[in-house]
Amino acid sequence: MSSTVDKTESPAEPVRESWWRTHSELGICVLLLAVGALVLVDAALIPTDFAQRGPVGPKAVPVVVGSLLVLVSLLLARDVLHGGRGEAEAGEDVDLDAPTDWRTLLLLSGFFLLNAALINIIGFPASAAIMFWGAAYALGSRNLVRDPLIAAAISVLTWLAFNELLGVPLPGGPLMGVL
């Protein structure tokens, strides 16, 4: 007795995805809604007696931002529930199979942590200049004259903008008397 085995493949049945998988963008909606609600609650708790200097008080911007976050989360949820899907990113030329460049990552992290450790000791302009130069070095720039000069100029201009224009005091360190 011999029997023949049918070796033709039957058409594969379409894989049915779960409801949560096809509506995964709802997670972003929940996150936006939670952040918006948190911002609104925090805005309601801001005391206005000490900071009110006109018709617009300190609550105005947080209320607007929180309200917009809630509105965007609701509009996005409506779109997702009506079949809207985000498009996959196609414009990036990134090799997802390439290994992580640990040297660059560790150098960037190290210069950032060095900035945090030095900012109160040597001041913002000097520590930020070290961080900016370190970031340029970690990312591949090896110009030993241009990079430190640009880093110093950016850090001093940033310090001046925060201190003088915005009124946000950053530690100046030993350069406080010079600048």
Image: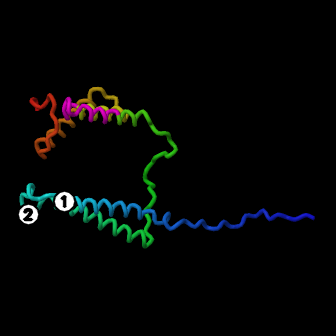
Residue that protrudes farthest toward the left in the picture: 54
Residue indicated by mark 2: 55
Closer to the eye: label 2 or 1: 1
Q: Quadrant of residue 13?
A: bottom right
Disc with the residue nearer the chain's start (2 vs 1): 1
Residue indicated by mark 1: 45
Q: Looking at the picture, tell me which residue is in the foreground, 166 or 114.
A: 114
Identify the image quadrant of the N terminus: bottom right
Specify whether residue 97 is painted magenta. no
Type of the residue with mark 1: Leu
Please, is residue 173 above or below residue 29 in the view? above
Q: Residues within 10 Å of mark 1 (few under 14, many from 20)?
A: few
Type of the residue with mark 2: Pro
Identify the image quadrant of the C terminus: top left
- Residue 15, how many percent across, how many down? 60, 65
Q: Residues within 10 Å of mark 2 (few under 14, many from 20)?
A: few
Label 2 element class: loop
Q: Which residues are magenta?
A: 110-126
Label 1 element class: loop
Taking the image as shown, residue 53 lies to the left or right of residue 120, namely left
